[in-house]
Amino acid sequence: MDKMKTIIVTGGAGFIGSNLIKILINNTKHHVVNIDKLTYAGNLESLKEASSNNRYSFINEDICNKKQLFKIFENYKPSFVMHLAAESHVDRSIGGPSDFIDTNIVGTFNLLEAARNYFNTFVKPKNKQFCFHHISTDEVYGDLVEKKDLFTEKTPYSPSSPYSATKAAADHLVRAWGRTYSLPIVITNCSNNYGPYHFPEKLIPHIILNALHGKPIPIYGDGSQIRDWLYVEDHAKALLKVVTSGRLGETYNIGGKNEKTNLEVAESICDLLEELAPEKPQGVEAYSDLITFVEDRPGHDKRYAIDATKIEKDLGWLPEETFETGLRKTVKWYLENREWWENVLSGDYRLERLG
């Protein structure tokens, strides 16, 4: 893929999307077209570096607007689509699932239809390269009971929340468009991401910022829920590998091999802050004293863990960061980029939701 091509990224102003665009601009020669509605979690400040590059274009659009999507495909003629646009917060989906239905299911359907029309009209007749890459989550699999169990690409779907149910539905739509309409597709399901530019309602930045403000660090239940943590830049590199080298029609699980309980995550962050930010807020003797157990989330999945053997063997991808190295980078980034998260917090979001 040395020749310059066009890549459409949906949701590119979000957490994973902005980190992906940085990788695409810095590590390839391609033109990146970012389609983002700029909802509460979309932040163009995360794309300052890319915005000055002539290989980057931004379109403020909603993927629920099918008519505009058809025009965008016709105008930009992409070789690749990397679909990340989604409502993604479990707590928000429990409180108000309708936006999740609209964006994650109807929006994905609209994007598939725009891609299908474009593929049949402009790509197939000229035998050009095209791939629709749908980026999804391990939450579609439900949770794991046995400690030795891992999610594989063949694990049956069993979503627990409105969020994961809508992502599962989107996965099924993408596979159906691949099989029924011969649309060239590939799907990836990733574990929990963390790293720079993460919206503060998610667990790790929520803990960091609450600690820095001397606020309680809320942990659901007893904090024993286990997640497999994946540094976002490792994920972005995996996505680039899949969209350019993955086999069409396949699914690839992407995980960081870093299983931690939520309590372990909170304690690790507090330990790093003791080292990196020793001047604590008034009245705080130790950051770990702020850890507070709260009532558990309804239907809270107990454990996620991914088997990433397939992408390792087939595409040669491995995560570069351990949880320890990635978490240190993340905490340092939030300490060094106060302006970014202060601007986020000056909006509607006030650290009121749990991660």
Image (cartoon, grey):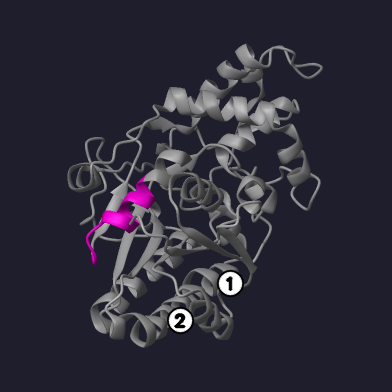
Q: Does residue 142 appear anywhere in the picture?
A: no
Whole-percent x and y of residue 44? Answer: 68, 53
Residue at coordinates 55% horizontally, 57% vertically from top-left? 55
Is residue 109 shown above or below 228? Answer: below
Q: Indicate whether residue 265 is drawn in magenta.
A: no
Answer with the quarter of the image where residue 261 lies: top left
Q: Does residue 210 appear anywhere in the picture?
A: yes
Is residue 348 shown above or below 186? Answer: above
- Quickly name the residue at label 1: 98
Give the structural element (helix, strand or loop) at label 2: helix
How many neighbours does mark 1 have within 10 angstroms: few (below 14), some (14-19), or many (20 or more)?
few
Dot placed on the residue nearer the N-terminal end, 2 or 1: 1
Residue sticking out furthest to the front: 3
Q: For the stretch drawn in magenta, what is the main secondary structure?
A: helix
The region drawn magenta spans 238-249
* C-alpha gap between disc 2 and disc 1: 23 Å
Q: Nearer the viewer, residue 76 or 298?
A: 76
Can you tell which of label 2 and label 1 is closer to the viewer? 2
Answer with the quarter of the image where residue 2 lies: bottom left
Residue at coordinates 56% horizontally, 48% vertically from top-left? 15
Q: Nearer the viewer, residue 295 or 49?
A: 49
- Left or right? Give the position of 26 relative to 56: left
Counting the numbered discs, the total is 2
Q: Nearer the viewer, residue 302 or 311?
A: 311
- Quickly name the residue at label 2: 114
Residue at coordinates 25% horizontally, 43% vertically from top-left? 307
Whole-percent x and y of residue 298? Answer: 51, 52
Is residue 11 shown above or below 274? Answer: below
Q: Indicate whether residue 241 is drawn in magenta.
A: yes
How many neighbours does mark 2 have within 10 angstroms: few (below 14), some (14-19), or many (20 or more)?
many
Which amino acid type corresponds to the residue marked 2 in the rendered image? Ala
Which amino acid type corresponds to the residue marked 1 in the rendered image? Ser
